[in-house]
Image: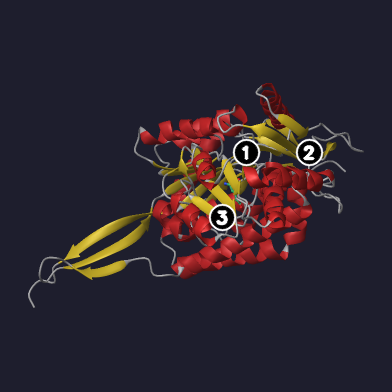
Amino acid sequence: MSPRVLTSIVAGLPVPGADRLADRNPSNLDDVVCEVELSGPDVAHDAVRAAQQALPRWSGTTPWQRAEVLDRAGSEVLARADELADLLAREEGKTLIEARGEVVRAGQILKYYAGSALQPHGQALDSVRPGVEVTVTREPVGVVTAITPWNFPIAIPAWKIAPALAYGNTVVLKPAELVPACAWELVDILNRAGLPPGALNLVLGRGSQVGPVLTGSPEVDAVTFTGSVGTGQAVMASTMTRGAKAQLELGGKNPLVVTEHADLQVAVECLIQGGFGSTGQRCTASSIAIVTDAVHDRFVAAVTQRLATWRVGDARADDTDMGPVVDSSQLEQDLRYLEIARTQGAEVVGGEVLDRARAGHYLSPALAVGTTITDTINTEEVFGPVVSVVRVPDYADALAAANASTMNLSAGICTTDLAESSHFKRHSSAGMVMVNLPTAGVDFHVPFGGRGASSYGPREQGTGAIEFFTTTKTAYTSPGAP
Ligand code: UN1
């Protein structure tokens, strides 16, 4: 059977493209998930214009109408969770359990923002001047471009699109080239759920071709982006010069502190799930274990033992704990960082390229032991199944090492000592702190984001999202004669 062909969607209609790209399954490179007809700058322009034209109609809908569309879409995502999870695992390479979790999260996000559309978001208050009334209302920002990464192919598009639409904006989605099929399904579901044509458009194209139009067009009022620091800087440059809003979620270099007061089994599980879940390809991944001297050797031995039985294989096989790396360039990057770690003195356990029945990008989980916090592997984001270990004398040094990160997205501590965990929550320089939990894996109803070079602009998700996707209007009224 020949693979299905996907195209961009502008104003509700498919847009054929000249150039074709095969979307390959990283667990089996012979398996083509779909073919994509790539769009160029012209289609990107059309998508932006379609979003602009749809704005008066969509922003003029009632909160109930917007809630109904999002709720209906959320129901379809949840009803099709198994099928969409299979597609996600096949396209991106996370395991079926992980993929199903992500799909369900996307459905829940759509429903959460359906509810949020109906919540009161304004204020009415007395002026400081006698007899004057003040209202603060929230209005949509306008046309929003959402640029999303390959590692959460359905949840990240959902958590950008859902609040944008809930608060009355129109959207152009540009997903990563590696994961067009999940994005296409989400847009199709939302369009069929009752969006007017043009309220949500999909541009499947190369970032270098369509990115400048989608971020730099004067009609684009806001850009929400998750991805690399380099691309994030380009987004920042093109939005800032014309005063458009930008929300950037960039890298993370997330420490997991393990002290001698930790429950060792809990700590091992936190590191395994946080470091190697989703093949380590999460900006929230627990990529550095900072371990106090008293427990270091026992912890490393327990993690090594656990990893020895960790099964790497086809993302859709029942007995797989960890799927493949997403593509060959990511695999090369992982191996390059392991080589640098070795030359800087680390002992690397695992990190071998694996052969499986079908050709794919398989890498065994890697633990780089004996690193220092200033080593390259501890200062740059690897984005793979690679965790390094730093030995420190005590908790105070562990905290200092954890706070040395310049991409402070999420920081974790494993301890049963209440004073230690309270101190860590208070003094961590990360945007999110986890106690006895992996640094990855977050809720959708609370703000998400980091500090330092990790995030820019208002927070995503939860109640934080309204800050980015709306703009306030303050109105003063004098009722005139009494
Ligand atoms: C999570 O850890 O549950 O790209 C979400 C990423 C993050 C999302 C992580 N923006 O990995």
In terms of sequence position, does the residue under pointer 3 or pointer 1 come before the other?
1
The reply to whether dot 3 and dot 1 touch (C-beta < 8 Å) is no
Q: Is residue 260 left or right of residue 169?
A: right
Above or below 246: residue 112? below
Point out the tag, 3 or 2, that comes first from the N-terminus.
2
Which residue was labeled with disc 1?
A: 391
Which amino acid lies under the numbered mark 2 shown in the image of this protein?
Pro
- Residue 168 in sight from this viewpoint: no
Q: Where does the image place residue 68, in percent across and percent down from the top left?
A: 54, 68
Extreme-left residue of the structure = 481
Tell which circle, 2 or 1, labels the residue nearer the N-terminal end: 2
Image quadrant containing the C terminus = bottom left
**Total number of numbered discs in the rendering:** 3
Residue at disc 3, secondary structure: strand
Q: State the residue at coordinates (18%, 63%).
A: 476
Q: Residue furthest right?
A: 357
Q: Residues within 10 Å of mark 1 (few under 14, many from 20)?
A: many
Q: Nearer the viewer, mark 3 or mark 1?
A: 1
Q: Which residue is mark 3?
A: 434
Disc 2 residue crowd, few under 14, some 14–19, many 20+, Cα 10 Å:
many
| Cα distance between the residues tagged 3 and 2 | 31 Å
Q: Secondary structure at mark 1?
A: strand
Q: Which mark is residue 26?
A: 2
Q: Nearer the viewer, mark 3 or mark 2?
A: 3
Q: Is residue 85 visible?
A: yes
Label 3: how many residues lie within 10 Å, few (<14), some (14-19) or many (20+)?
A: some
Instruction: Mark 2 and ligand 1: say if the CB distance to the nearest ligand atom is below 8 Å.
Output: no
- Residue at coordinates 49% horizontally, 35% vertically from top-left? 232
Kind of residue indicated by mark 1: Arg
Q: Which amino acid type is shown beneath numbered disc 3? A: Met
